[in-house]
Image: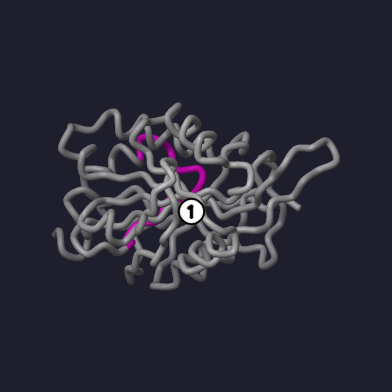
Amino acid sequence: MTRTLRRSRPGVAAALALAASLALTACGSSEPASSGNGAVVTQDEDRSLYKGTEVDTAFAKPDLRFTDTEGKPFDLRKQTAGRTVLLFFGYTNCPDVCPTTLSDLALALREQPKDVRDKTDVVFVSTDPDRDTPQVLKKWLASFNKDFIGLRGDLQQVKQAALSLGIEVEEPEVHHDGSVHSSHGAQVPAFLPTDDKAHVLYTSNTPMKSFAHDLPLLAKGKQSTTAK
């Protein structure tokens, strides 16, 4: 069962419901299958400052309290307050969407001036915490960017935190050949430093140039409705 997330743009403040309905990404396959509702929503041309999907109604940063790759408690709300946060759920053995997304984020950050980089956190939450040990997660994230934050927690808590953002996470599936696939939504919500709320969503096929364009705007807390 493979369902591929497709790029979307909500015209109203139904971003979470739309994101949840569009799909899970089963890492290991790039073939799209029909979604339950068959919905494919294209991004409208509008006046948004962002290349990503700017939602009409922002949503709060989840109350996520997990453990980082050093084994220390990490409170997402407290430890990223007043910073740009791009939050992504995935796992280290993912052969496609996870490394692609993180690579694009790493390259986009590399293009930014120091002040933007210093104000931006990329937080990766493992959807396969049994296999993603702290050491494995730390080494894997460092291959993209040593400053990326890796978090682990009880899978049920991970699923609950993701669902609060409209992102589905399923139980990892072990195949007969020993490979493991973890189906998870590939959306990346971006939380602004000004109010710690997500105002922009990115989907799995977001190009690096879109991230590079948006990161300075995110760092400044820009919103199309207030930045005219």
Q: Is residue 65 left or right of residue 2?
A: left
- The residue positioned 44% from the left and 51% from the top of the image is 67
Q: Is residue 207 above or below residue 164?
A: above
- Residue 47 visible in image: no
Q: Write down the quadrant of residue 82 in the picture.
A: bottom left
Asked whether 202 falls inside the magenta stretch, the response is yes
Front position in the image: 5 or 79: 79
In the orientation shown, which residue stands out farthest toward the right?
176
- What is the x, y in percent for residue 37? 66, 67
- Residue 11 visible in image: yes
- What is the x, y in percent for residue 81? 24, 58
Q: Write down the quadrant of residue 147 in the picture.
A: top left
Numbered disc 1: secondary structure = loop
In the orientation shown, which residue stands out farthest toward the front?
71
Q: Quadrant of the C terminus?
A: bottom left
Q: Tag 1: residue type?
A: Gln
Asked whether 109 falls inside the magenta stretch, the response is no
What residue is shown with label 1?
187
- The residue positioned 44% from the left and 72% from the top of the image is 14
Q: How many marks?
A: 1
- What is the x, y in percent for residue 181? 69, 45
For the rendered model, the colour scheme is one colour
Q: Write down the quadrant of residue 175 in the picture.
A: top right
Q: Is residue 192 above or below residue 145?
A: below
Q: Badge 1, how many Cα within 10 Å: few under 14, some, many 20+?
A: many
Front position in the image: 210 or 119: 119
- The residue positioned 47% from the left and 39% from the top of the image is 101
Front position in the image: 181 or 209: 181
- What is the x, y in percent for residue 39? 61, 63
Which stretch appears magenta? 198-210
